[in-house]
Each structure stands twice: as structure tokens, then as C-alpha cells.
Image (tube, coloured by chain):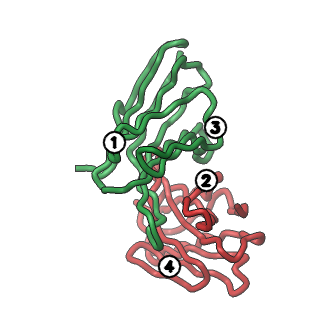
Chain colours: A red, B green
Amino acid sequence: DAKTTQPPSMDCAEGRAANLPCNHSTISGNEYVYWYRQIHSQGPQYIIHGLKNNETNEMASLIITEDRKSSTLILPHATLRDTAVYYCIVSSRSTGFQKLVFGTGTRLLVSP
Amino acid sequence: DADVTQTPRNRITKTGKRIMLECSQTKGHDRMYWYRQDPGLGLRLIYYSFDVKDINKGEISDGYSVSRQAQAKFSLSLESAIPNQTALYFCATSGPGQGSNEQFFGPGTRLTVL
């Protein structure tokens, strides 16, 4: 599985967009990009995933570059409850098993 | 009610004791997982199961065993607990097929081995 690189921490003002970057330069063609978050020792929560097209759901948007070597998770209007560690994960589905390798993620702090 | 439940939520035990952590799910998923998380680190996969008859080791299975009693239940055992197994343990589930790769996590069990 490809490795990912994320900044260790980021700050965002409440109400502003939070843009969390992730580099995955060795991603292969059948690997998806997943985003999860973990709020203070709670179980991780799935946010969104994508292959090559941009994706949007009720929680966030995922922008994947055309070469698929990097992506950005966008929380359009961050709230205090979005303070969490955000994990960018690249996972292959070729074996039918969703192996998710969690790194250390980006700690997002949303401030008033 | 939560879709993925774990019991106990907190446990303190002594070195050498046998410990079982239990996980139940009501999502109807066939795939279940056990992870551990150490302070400041990401999650690491201990075991995973595709169905009742299929159990596989993850990246850190030494010192652990599992039992898939039913589709909805997946237990993790520490046969002889040691202090470096002190960690936060998470159970997760996922469904099969295309577009169902997201894993749903339980609330976690905080285990302390003295």
C-alpha cells in the first residue's frame, strides 16, 4: 500500500474552510484515497473516499489532483466540533480486503 | 443504540491475567477488525475476519487471539497480558462489495496492564 504524508498539525478559525492536504506520490491505479477522523480517543469516523474524481458528501469535499499524487480534504465551514486528528489513507481493493493503514494524521484545531 | 459496541469500555488488569474484549455489531456486516492504538500513534491492525470461518492475522497479532462466535460478534483475547499491551483497542466492521469500504468503529476499550 502507498504511504501518505500529512502535516502534523493545522489551525483553522471557526466558520472558515479547513483545507487538509495529503501527499501520496506512490499511489497505484487501483488504490483509493480515504479520509477518516478521530475526535479525542473516540473511534475513528469515516469521512469520504475517492479514486480519481472529486467527491462531495454532507461532511466534506475531496479534491484529488489529476495525477492522483495528492489530495485535499475540505471542510467548508469548520466548527469547534471538527477539532480532531484527520487521517489520509490509501487502500487497495484488489484483494477484496479494505486494509486501512493509519499513520499519525493531521491534528486540526478549530478555534473561535 | 450504537451500531458497534465494545465491552468493557475500561479495564485494569495485572500482568499474566487472561483478558477478553468483546465486540458486537448490528450493522449486518460480514467483516470485522480489531485494532490497537498507542498514545500519539495511529491505529495498527491486530486481526481481521471476513466471515465466521475466515480469520486472518494483521500486522501485530503476536500475544493476541480472536474468536468469531457469530457474524455479529468478534472477541479479542490476551492469553497472558503484559504491560506493553496497555493501549486503546478498537473494533470495526465493514460491508462487502463496491463502494462499501468504509469501516465503522466502536467506541473503544481502554486497557491497562499493571
- Pointer 2 with pointer 3, Cβ within 8 A: no
Q: Secondary structure at mark 4?
A: strand
Q: Which mark is residue B70?
A: 1
Of mark 3 and mark 1, the one earlier in the sequence is 3
What is the distance, in whole Å, between disc 4 and disc 1 at their CAs? 37 Å
- Of all chains, the one bearing label 2 is A
Residue at the far front: name it: B53
Q: Amino acid at mark 3?
A: Ile
Residue corresponding to mark 4: A61
- Pointer 4 with pointer 1, Cβ within 8 A: no
- Of all chains, the one bearing label 3 is B
Q: Which circle, 3 or 1, is nearer the viewer?
A: 1
Residue corresponding to mark 2: A102
Q: Amino acid at mark 1?
A: Ala
Rendered position, A107 above or below B58? below
What is the distance, in whole Å, between disc 3 and disc 4 at their CAs? 33 Å
Q: Secondary structure at mark 1?
A: strand
Marks 3, 1 in one chain? yes
Marks 2, 4 in one chain? yes
